[in-house]
Image (tube, rainbow, N blue to C red):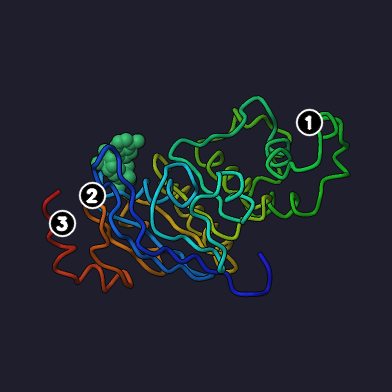
Amino acid sequence: AGMSSDYLEVRGLSVEFDGFKAVSDVDLTLLQGDLRFLIGPNGAGKTTIIDAITGLVPATGSVQKSGTELLGKKVHQIARQGVGRTFQTASVFEELTVLQNLDIAAGAGRSMWTMLRRRPAAVPEAIEEALETIGLADLRDRPAGVLAHGQKQWLEIGMLLVQDASVLLLDEPVAGMSHEEREETGALLRRIGAARTVVVVEHDMDFMRSYATSVTVLARGKVLAEGTVAEVQANPKVQEVYLGT
Ligand code: ADP
């Protein structure tokens, strides 16, 4: 994060699995402040796009973050460029406290031992800020394993924040959440999204309508439509895809 405007530019992105084109020549331009939803039927290639951007699957084309090419870099190098992602199933350390989870994520340069011994007074500012942002400040000393489902997702987002991610790719962040948790997650995404770029893969259309600033609709690995919620909803090609499912 910084004062300068960040962007992620995806050009001609393609991913093949044994000759099957899961992602086919996808272009995406994501700017700071975007809360972009990626939607589309099952198997459209949404998760594979996130996997390709974060280096988990090999891809061709180009993915640039503020001018730096990410394609071909390793997962940790891409993370260090400020591109972070969550998975459909929250992956937090259940035995460790909320604070320790954030500490590990912030990690670089500190040993596990230093971290476990540290007095509460020494909590770094970035972690304190993340705790407030994700609404878990009062639960900092609880083991992550006792958190509610929604709180674990927020903790995972907090782990990206302390890593200083400026592009956050979230895979179905509200799946399995209660109505209240969804609303809180939407508010959280708006809070963090203003100075970052947030990409949300989502099936929940009500959630999308409430929070998306822009939408990309995928079908069979290709971009079918892109625009505001109203624009994509009015698009006959999009209606066709959704009536068919
Ligand atoms: P979505 O997230 O839109 O539901 P995915 O990106 O998960 O779609 O999958 C896109 C297509 O690629 C699907 O047909 C899926 O079966 C296929 N696919 C995804 N991952 C792999 C893999 N590791 N090996 C082979 N095929 C895969």
Residue at figure coordinates x 56%, y 54% from the top left: 83
Above or below residue 9? Residue 178 is above
Does residue 103 appear left or right of residue 39 in this picture? right
Q: Which residue is mark 1?
A: 112
Q: Residue furthest top?
A: 95
Residue at figure coordinates x 50%, y 48% from the top left: 54
Q: Amino acid at mark 3?
A: Val
Residue 125 got which mark?
A: none
Q: Residues within 10 Å of mark 2 (few under 14, many from 20)?
A: some
Residue at figure coordinates x 24%, y 41% from the top left: 19
Instruction: State ligand 1's quadrant.
Output: top left
The CA span between labels 3 and 2 is 8 Å
Residue 1 at x, y percent in the picture = 66, 64
Q: Which residue is mark 3?
A: 241
Q: Is mark 2 within 8 Å of ligand 1?
A: yes
Residue 57 at x, y percent in the picture = 42, 42
Label 2 sits on a secondary structure element that is loop
For the residues labelled 1 and 3, say whether their Cβ atoms are less than 8 Å apart. no
Q: Amino acid at mark 2?
A: Pro
Label 1 sits on a secondary structure element that is helix
Q: Amino acid at mark 1?
A: Met
The CA span between labels 1 and 3 is 49 Å
For the residues labelled 3 and 2, say whether their Cβ atoms are less than 8 Å apart. yes
Residue 41 got which mark?
A: 2
Residue 113 at x, y percent in the picture = 83, 28
